[in-house]
């Protein structure tokens, strides 16, 4: 059995970065917040602060591979962000394939009829939950 820990999901974006966290049992991923920040360094510092406040033990950072599995500029930026977070927090990180998470987040918000400004403010946190949830499912399957 894998040791359970508090894991923080991060959906890094140029303007908005979604943050999610799971409980110690790794059962449920929940949205925490969306960091509104366009400066790369400042965003990393605010994300590191969230990791500290949430008592995260591992970071799962969305890694937007291209549909043909290649690594583009966006994925490289996410990897640089993950490395900076590691320097700031000392926490290990996992780059998690996030293809289609934003699409899933939009579908979820359609189902819950979330519209307008509210939608824009939560979409990234929902995407971070989907990234973390996907990773938790993977961990659970690895343990079994």
Image: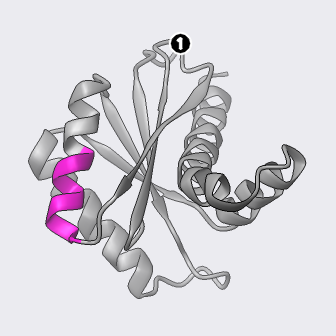
Quarter-of-image position of residue 55: top left
Q: Residue furthest front?
A: 117
The x, y position of residue 27, in whole percent, is 62, 19
Decide whether residue 46 is among the magenta residues: yes
**Which of the two residues, 142 or 127, is positioned nearer the viewer here?**
127
The residue sitting at 57% across, 30% down in the picture is 30
The x, y position of residue 111, in whole percent, is 89, 48
Decide whether residue 75 is among the magenta residues: no
Using a 10 Å C-alpha cutoff, classify the residue at mark 1 as few (fewer than 14 neighbours), some (14 to 19) or many (20 or more).
Answer: few
The answer to whether residue 44 is above or below residue 142 is: below
- Residue denoted by label 1: 25
Q: Residue furthest right?
A: 111
Q: Across the whole image, how many numbered discs are drawn on residues? A: 1
Left or right? Give the position of 77 relative to 43. Answer: right
Q: Is residue 11 visible?
A: no
**Which of the two residues, 35 or 82, is positioned nearer the viewer here?**
35
Which stretch is magenta?
39-47
The residue sitting at 70% across, 61% down in the picture is 116
Q: Main secondary structure of the magenta part?
A: helix
The residue sitting at 82% across, 57% down in the picture is 107
The x, y position of residue 108, in whole percent, is 80, 49
Left or right? Give the position of 13 relative to 66. Answer: left
Task: Name the quadrant of the C terminus.
Answer: top right
Left or right? Give the position of 43 relative to 123. Answer: left
Left or right? Give the position of 131 relative to 19. Answer: right
| Element marked by disc 1 | loop
The answer to whether residue 138 is above or below residue 23 is: below
Q: Is residue 22 visible?
A: yes
State the colouring used for the structure image.
Answer: one colour
The x, y position of residue 134, in whole percent, is 64, 43
The residue sitting at 68% across, 31% down in the picture is 141
């Amino acid at each position: 059995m894998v040791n359970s820990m508090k894991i923080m999901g991060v959906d890094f974006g140029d303007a908005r970065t979604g943050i999610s966290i799971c409980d110690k049992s790794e059962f449920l991923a929940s949205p925490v917040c969306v960091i509104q920040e366009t400066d790369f360094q400042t965003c990393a510092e605010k994300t590191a602060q969230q990791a500290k406040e949430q008592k995260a033990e591992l970071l799962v950072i969305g890694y937007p591979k291209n549909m043909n599995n290649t690594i583009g500029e966006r994925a490289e930026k996410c990897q640089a962000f993950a490395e900076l977070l590691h320097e700031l927090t000392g926490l290990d990180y996992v780059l998690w394939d996030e293809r289609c998470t934003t699409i899933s987040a939009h579908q979820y918000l359609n189902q819950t009829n979330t519209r307008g400004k509210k939608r824009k403010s939560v979409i990234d946190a929902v995407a971070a939950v989907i990234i973390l949830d996907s990773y938790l499912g993977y961990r659970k399957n690895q343990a079994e």
